[in-house]
Image (tube, rainbow, N blue to C red):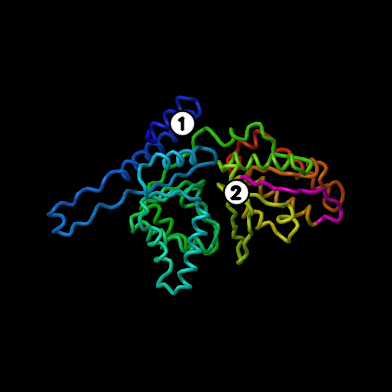
Amino acid sequence: MPGLLARYDALIASGELRADPDQRAAAERLDRLQRELEAPPPAAGLIGKLLGKRPAPPPRGLYIWGGVGRGKSMLMDLFVETLGIAHKRRVHFHAFMLEVDRRMAAARKAQVKDPLIAVALDMAAGLKCLAFDEMVVNNTADAAIMGRFFTALMEAGTVIVTTSNRPPRDLYKDGLNRSLFLPFINLVEAKMDVLSLNGPTDYRLDRIGGLATWHAPIGDAATAQVREAFFRLTDFQPEDAAHVPSGELDLGGGRRLHVPKSLKGVGVFSFKKLCGANRGAADYLAIAQAYHTVILVGIPKMGPENRNEAIRFTKLIDALYEHRVKLFVTAAAAPEDLYRSGDGAFEFERTVSRLNEMQSDGYLALGHGTQD
C-alpha cells in the first residue's frame, strides 16, 4: 500500500489538492509518525534484560489545528488508511467521550476501584494509535476528567493523534470550572507536537460551491438541499444517514442542549427548539462558539403573535453573524417576508440585512470567529 506522502503527492499531481506549505508540513510530520508506529520494537538484548532496561517510550502524539476546510480531515483519512498497524482506531471525539461515559457508569455499577483509570487502561489495551477528528470540548463533565483519563491512556502506550479548529489553549475557553481542564492542556503540550494548519485554501468552501444557503418554501426540496450541505461539510456518507452522531452542548448552570446532528463543527437545529423555547443571548453565544456551521430548519413566517420567537431569532442571528458562523436554512419565506408586522418588526430589518449578507460569497469565505 502506498504511504501517506505518496498518496498526498498523487492528490497534488492530479489537481485534487493545491500546493500548501502548511499542509505539506503536516503530511510530512504524520508520515514520520507512521514510520515510528510501524517500526518493530528494538530488541532489549541480554544485558538490557538483565539490567531490567525499560522499553523505549512510545512516539509523541500529534495535535493539528486550523481553520475550517484546510484539509485536516483529509490528512487524518490518509494517515489512518495508510498506517500499517493492526491496533489502530479512528473515532469522532464526541462519540468517544460518550463511550467513556457509558463504560465508566458500568464500572461504577460493578464497584470497580477508580473507574476512570480502569476504563482508560481497558481501552488502551492493545490500542497503539487512537485518532480523533475535530476535538472540541463543550461539556463540563468531559473537561473535568480528560487530564487524568488521557494521561492514563498515554502512559499505557497509546499514541493520540487529533485535529481541532482551535489551538490547545483555546479549548474549553471561558468554560465553567475551566481550571479542571488545564491539566489536559498541559498534557497535550508536554506529550504531543502541536502543528498549525491554516493554509490559504478552504477546501470545505469549495465543496459547498454551487449550493445556496437559504431554501424556501419548507418542503422536501429544501430539506434535500440542507441535507446535501451537511454531508458535504462533514464527509459523512449519505447512505449511513441513520447513524449521524448527535451531541450535547453545555449551556452553563447545569443546563445542556441536545443537538440532533452534530459532527465536525456542523450542528443541525430546529427553529422550534432554538427560538420557540425560553432562551437568551448566552445560549446562542454558546452555539456560535461551538459550531462553524449551523443548519436551522423550519423557520416559519411570524406575526404579532410570534413576537417572542422573533426576538429570540434576532438574538440567534446576531450571535451567529458576529462569530461568522455559516448558516443553512429551510424557511417558509425569504428573509424580507419572515416578520413583517408586530413589535420589533422595524428593528427586524437589521436581521434581514444580516441574513442576506450571510448568503454572500464574501461572508462564506470568512473564517469562524473572525471579526474582519
* Residue 371: % across, % down: 61, 43
* Residue 210: % across, % down: 66, 31
Label 1 SS: loop
Tell me: residue 155, above or below residue 16. below
Amino acid type of the residue that numbered disc 2 sits on in the rendered structure = Tyr
* Closest to the observer, 284 or 16: 16
Point 41% across, 38% down: residue? 26
Point 47% across, 44% down: residue? 65
Residue that numbered label 1 is attached to: 20
Judge left or right: residue 139 versus residue 226: left
Tell me: residue 250, above or below residue 199. below
Q: Quadrant of residue 29?
A: top left
Write the start and end of the magenta stretch as one range: 293-307
* Residue 277: % across, % down: 73, 60
Point 39% across, 31% down: residue? 6
Residue that numbered label 2 is attached to: 291
Judge left or right: residue 300 versus residue 12: right
Point 49% across, 56% down: residue? 96
Magenta segment: does it hold 304? yes
* Closest to the observer, 245 or 159: 245
Q: Residues within 10 Å of mark 1 (few under 14, many from 20)?
A: some
Label 2 SS: loop
Q: Residue furthest front?
A: 239
Label count reads 2
**Mark toward the start of the polypeptide (2 vs 1):** 1
Magenta segment: does it hold 177? no
Q: Quadrant of residue 331?
A: top right
Quadrant of the drawing holding the C terminus: top right
Amino acid type of the residue that numbered disc 1 sits on in the rendered structure = Asp
Q: Residues within 10 Å of mark 2 (few under 14, many from 20)?
A: many
